[in-house]
Image (cartoon, grey):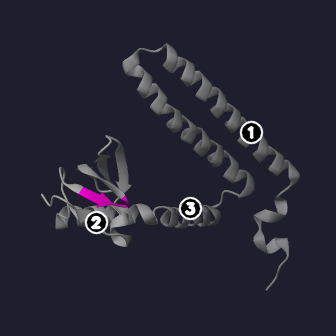
Amino acid sequence: MSTDLATWGHLEKLTWMHVLLAVIVLAAAGLASFLLRGLLRRIAESASPHLRLSILRAMPVVRLLIGMTALIVVVPIFVEPTFKNAVVVVASAGLALAFAFKDYGNSLVAGLMTVLENTYQPGDWIELGGVYGEVKSIGLRATRIVTADDTEVIVSNSVIWSGSIANATSG
């Protein structure tokens, strides 16, 4: 197996200038995120009360968009944008997302099984994942429980697979 850089194609062209450019792009994205977060916070403070929460909810979305834009700009600096390289990057990202969403899929299937099996329903007092309270809603991803001290707890449905469910009212 040959180990020289020519077999990798795009790696032999990588220079410190590429790394510096990527660092500058990432630093600019971080600075833009910091400045926009401060700007949105100031706008939210001066906005009317019913708009304040909507503006504050936009902050994570703005940060995500800035991060994704920075990633889209940085990847072509390191990887030559050919069809073969694009397929490799997309396949790698797909594999990473599959591992990242494995637990999310687990919660969705558990939520579906909860709804179909009617294990518990809204209004029941249950203990799920170490939390005891009244079920307020059952979603596909999580169950919302309000405890006796009026605290809302959102429990992932995936705990159904690994723990027990105590239903005090059973409907």
Looking at the image, residue 92 lies above or below residue 65: below
Instruction: Provide the residue designation for mark 2.
Output: 165
Judge depth for marks 3 and 2 and give the one in front: 2
Mark 1 is surrounded, within 10 Å at the Cα level, by few (under 14), some (14 to 19) or many (20 or more) other residues, namely few
**Residue most extreme to the front:** 149
Residue at image location 72% in from the left, 42% down from the top: 26
Disc nearer the start of the sequence (1/3): 1
In reply to whether residue 81 is colored magenta, the answer given is no
Is 39 left, or right, of 134 in this rendering?
A: right
* Pointer 3 with pointer 2, Cβ within 8 A: no
For numbered disc 1, what is the local secondary structure? helix
For numbered disc 3, what is the local secondary structure? helix
Q: Residue type at mark 2?
A: Ile
Disc nearer the start of the sequence (1/2): 1
Instruction: Provide the residue designation for mark 1.
Output: 27
Q: Residue type at mark 1?
A: Ala
Judge depth for marks 1 and 3 and give the one in front: 1
Residue at image location 56% in from the left, 61% down from the top: 93
Mark number displayed over residue 93: 3
For numbered disc 2, what is the local secondary structure? strand
Q: Main secondary structure of the magenta part?
A: strand
Dividing the image into 4 quarters, which one contains the C terminus? bottom left
* Pointer 1 with pointer 3, Cβ within 8 A: no
Is 169 left, or right, of 114 in this rendering?
A: left
What residue range appears in magenta? 126-130
Disc nearer the start of the sequence (3/2): 3
Dividing the image into 4 quarters, which one contains the N terminus? bottom right
Is 94 left, or right, of 162 in this rendering?
A: right
